[in-house]
Amino acid sequence: YSGELSGCTMSGAGRLEWPGGTVYEGDFAKNTPEGEGAFTWPDQSRYAGAVSAGRRHGRGEYVASDGARYEGEWRNGLRHGTGRLTYACGAMYEGKWLDGRREGEGTMAYASSNVYRGQWKASCRRDAVERDPSSPVQAQERYVGEWEAGVRQGRTGTFYYANGATYAGEWRSNQKHGPGVFVFEDGSVFDGLFAHDR
């Protein structure tokens, strides 16, 4: 440790390096990182922002070793509150978090240009969501309907295909399954039962 002391206690601004290679530089109180500071871990991931009891707590930014970046609120070392996570693959989630998981209202923009907006539970889409029509990228395919555990599932869901065809009906495990109506690109219609996407 190098920095300010109060008696024999780390207090004020300082820098602490652990034997494993983790480094913290910032505010201390009673021998503990507290206030504003920055962590750097051995894998080169890093965090800068609010710290409480030695954990990310409050508002801050974390950059993972693979380049993923989270900017937002934290509680007890976990993403919690409102924040934006940009994944290394180019996808981006912005919305509510609860104990490190996507929870509540949020928007996920995938690298493929598909954008989903709606309710999330334990990091899975929960309700009717659709591609954001305000996106500057031309929509290829779009789904509006029910979700369960992150897949198309339920009695009502409409899928708009890139070629102009549409399907409206029941879904099971991301497949057309049950009564539904398929309108082909040429305008012809099939109204009947589907089983396992056929």
Image: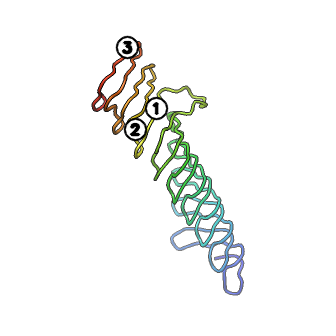
Sequence-wise first label, 3 or 2: 2
Sequence-wise first label, 3 or 1: 1
The image quadrant where one finds the N terminus is bottom right
Query: Left or right: 151 with respect to 25?
Result: left
Which numbered marker is on residue 152? 2
SS of the residue under disc 1: strand
Mark 3 → mark 1, Cα distance in angstroms: 21 Å
Which amino acid does the dot numbered 3 rest on?
Ser
Which amino acid does the dot numbered 2 rest on?
Arg
The image quadrant where one finds the C terminus is top left
Which numbered marker is on residue 188? 3
- Write the residue at 31% across / 30% down: 197
Q: Nearer the viewer, residue 122 or 27?
A: 122
Relative to 184, residue 13 above or below? below
Q: Position of residue 44 (x, y in %)?
A: 55, 58
Q: Residues within 10 Å of mark 3 (few under 14, many from 20)?
A: few
Q: Position of residue 103 (x, y in %)?
A: 51, 52
Residue that badge 1 annotates: 143
Which amino acid does the dot numbered 1 rest on?
Tyr
Q: Position of residue 59 (x, y in %)?
A: 65, 59
SS of the residue under disc 2: strand
Query: Left or right: 74 with respect to 174?
Result: right
Relative to 59, residue 135 above or below? above
Q: Are marks 2 and 1 in contact (CB under 8 Å)?
A: yes
Mark 2 → mark 1, Cα distance in angstroms: 9 Å
Q: Position of residue 76 (x, y in %)?
A: 56, 66
SS of the residue under disc 3: loop
